[in-house]
Image (spheres, helix red, strand yellow):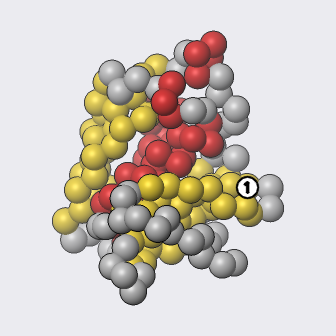
Amino acid sequence: MPMPVPPPASQPSWAHFEHRADMGVAGYGMTPAEAFEQAALALTAIICDPARVRPAQAIPIQCEEPDLELLFVDWLNALIYEMAVRHMLFSRFQVQIDGAVLRAEAWGEPIDPERHQPAVEIKGATYTALAVQQDDAGHWVARCVVDV
């Protein structure tokens, strides 16, 4: 599967990519942390328009994995877990990665079906099409397929 082409600017961004019945998410940034933040925004965008989600409440998240790819999947699955148990959606993320440890805050609000109009429920992030890598220009991409 070809890697999604990053945007031309050095601005952090996110994207979806096709993958059979599931959905791929990709985040782009100047650091792995920025790419993880943008991929989290892409995760929300599968469910609803992130612009409709107010960043009213901060939820702390911490993950620890031995490499960036495993850390990325763990990060997305931690977000999916928090969405499910708290019945929340998130629209703003701040990620710090120090070696094998990710510390983050996700800001969001409880789901309002009328305002958010959720399209699908995400079941989990997978190892399919998993990559966290830096391109020749120094930009980072973090991507994988999520089960919807």
- The N terminus: image quadrant: bottom right
Residue 74 higher or lower than 129, as above or below: above
Rendered position, 53 above or below 12:
above
Left or right: 147, with 65 as reference point: right
Residue 143, visible in the rendered structure: yes
Q: Nearer the viewer, residue 33 or 80?
A: 33
Tell me the residue that label 1 is attached to.
Answer: 22
Q: Quadrant of residue 29?
A: bottom left
- Tell me if 5 is positioned left or right of 79 in this view: right
* Residue occupying image coordinates x 28% and y 41%: 105
Residue 40 image point, x, y percent: 45, 49
Extreme-bottom residue of the structure: 136
Name the residue furthest right. Answer: 20
Residue 69: image location, x then y, percent: 44, 72
Q: Residue at x 49, y 65 (%)?
A: 7
Residue occupying image coordinates x 37% and y 73%: 139
The answer to which of 19 and 8 lies nearer the viewer is 8
Which secondary structure, mark 1? strand
Coordinates of residue 122 in the picture (x, y in percent): 63, 43
Q: Tell me if residue 71 can be seen.
A: no
Instruction: Give the farthest residue toward the front.
Output: 8
Q: Vertically, is 128 above or below 115?
A: below
Crowding near the residue tagged with mark 1, few <14, some 14–19, many ≥20 C-alpha atoms within 10 Å: few
Residue 3 at x, y percent in the picture: 60, 76
In the drawing, does residue 44 fall left or right of residue 71? right
Amino acid at pointer 1: Asp
- Total marks drawn? 1
Q: Please say if 78 is above or below 74.
A: above
